Image (cartoon, grey):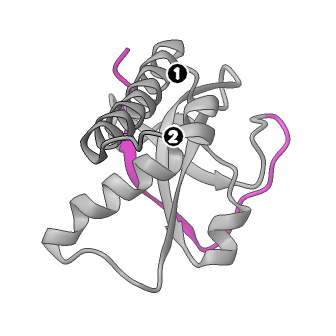
Amino acid sequence: MTKKPKFGAVLVVLFLLGAGVVAARNLYSRTLLRTGDPVAISAQLGPQIDRALREAMAPHQLESQNISTKIVPLLSVENRAPIGLVQVSGSKDAVDKTKAVVQIGTRVPPLSASQARVLVPIDSADATHFKRVSGVGVCALIDIKL
């Protein structure tokens, strides 16, 4: 005669396995964030970050069902390196074409001591060769705390 596992023991094992998966995912996320690599972070955690930002907008009735959003790296044109993350929004086709956003720093002549950061959605993750993606805007800047 074989013994059947008790239902409670099965639940405990399943719970521990689930908790292990969650703990492993959290450890992986923390490790990824410590690297500070916006390209890797956007690729691996982008959908989770995007969902959190959309949920943050929902109580303020700022959400639109006809607009797509996505997390992409923010690249500096000056030093050709990833420097952060942004959320872009627009039509699904335009957002799908967007691979990154470039930041171009410039002075604003009428405001003598002022600087502007121009943010342009682009079709490449390369800050040296890209084309602007029309119909996409930047709706959130994400600071990565290391």
What label does residue 45 carry, if any? 2
Q: Is residue 110 magenta?
A: no
Which residue carries the number 1 mark? 32
Relative height, residue 108 to residue 40 (above, below): below
71 shown above or below 93: above
Over which residues does the magenta segment extend?
A: 128-146
Labelled disc at residue 119: none
Q: CA distance from mark 2 to mark 1?
A: 9 Å
Residue type for callout 1: Leu
Task: Tell me: 58 left or right of 25.
Answer: left
Q: Amino acid at mark 2?
A: Leu
Picture residue at 52% right of the left edge, 46% below the top: 46
Q: Is residue 145 magenta?
A: yes
Residue 15 appears in view: yes
Q: Main secondary structure of the magenta part?
A: loop
In the foreground, 77 or 12? 12
The answer to which of 117 and 27 lies nearer the viewer is 27
Label whose residue precedes the other's in the sequence (2 or 1): 1
Circles 2 and 1: CB distance less than 8 Å?
yes
Residue 73, horizontal then vertical, whole percent: 58, 39
Task: Please indicate whether residue 41 sits to the left or right of residue 110 in the image.
Answer: right
Q: Which residue is more in the foreground, 67 or 4?
A: 4
Q: Residue at x 52, y 35 (%)?
A: 106
Q: Looking at the image, is 5 positioned above or below residue 63?
A: above
> Regarding mark 2 in the picture, which secondary structure is present there?
helix
Q: Residues within 10 Å of mark 2 (few under 14, many from 20)?
A: some
